[in-house]
Image (cartoon, rainbow, N blue to C red):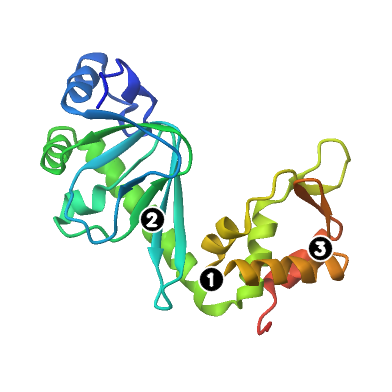
Amino acid sequence: MMDVIDGGLARVSLFSDMDETALGDIEARCNWSRVPTGAQIFDKDSDTLDVYFVVEGAVRILTTGSDEREVALADVIAGNYFGELAAIDGMKRSARVVATKDSVLASLEGGAFLELMRQYPVIAIKVVERLTRIVRSLDSRVAQLSSQSESQRVWGEILRLAQPDPAKPDSWQIADLPNHKEIAAWAGTTREKVAQAIGELAREGVVRRRSMGLVICDLPRLQLMAAARGAA
């Protein structure tokens, strides 16, 4: 537990329309905590109903597939929130959440969150809008996991992580490549498969390893490989 951070919830998009007095009241009702990197906030199937607001840092939402592999569903960064599903329907947690950075979280008991939605319709509307985005995003995620091969999903993650190289016009790179475990979580595969898929890209001349990252040598081909149907 830690002291209330005055104005801390002003950083959370859900409360962007709240006046200072109302915001202060909500902050006083929250429990505040510092969470170190790697710490679990709650586990899948737990009975907790609190809603969490990320004031600083970031967390990752993870679930387990039918093959017991852990799959990343979303990263929640500072200014956003998570845990509202259990607060709304009163059911067990559908995923587990861990901190990916040292974080400051404010949590509100589920019943108090529902009361807040009834008291402030603008908050209720924002929650509904966010739930709609979550459903759309998960639909796309399920389609990706079910229709693409493991290699394709890894290549898709490499493509997602690629950024323009500021030092070289028309060049792309991943300056700091995440470890294989993290890529595997997003791709719904194993670390070994990540290593194999990246190795294949390197052998084909699509990428080249550089320090802690990758240089994308052939972006159009990477795009084709990630999008191709029926890849092994």
Q: Nearer the viewer, residue 209 or 232?
A: 209
Residue 5 in the image: x percent, y percent?
A: 31, 18
Residue 129 in the image: x percent, y percent?
A: 33, 48
**Which residue corresponds to mark 3?**
220
Task: Kindly state the secondary structure of the residue where label 2 is placed.
Answer: helix
Of the numbered discs in the image, which one, if any, rests on residue 185? none
For marks 3 and 2, the one nearer the N-term is: 2
Instruction: Identify residue type, mark 2.
Output: Ile
Task: Kindly state the secondary structure of the residue where label 1 is placed.
Answer: helix
- Which residue corresponds to the image point at 21% horizontal and 56% vertical from the top-left? 46
Taking the image as shown, residue 13 lies to the left or right of residue 49, namely right
Count of numbered labels shown in the rendering = 3
**Which residue corresponds to mark 1?**
144
Q: Residues within 10 Å of mark 3 (few under 14, many from 20)?
A: few
**Whole-number angstrom distance, CA of label 3 to CA of label 2:** 30 Å
Q: Quadrant of residue 27?
A: top left
Taking 227 as reference, is 14 above or below it? above
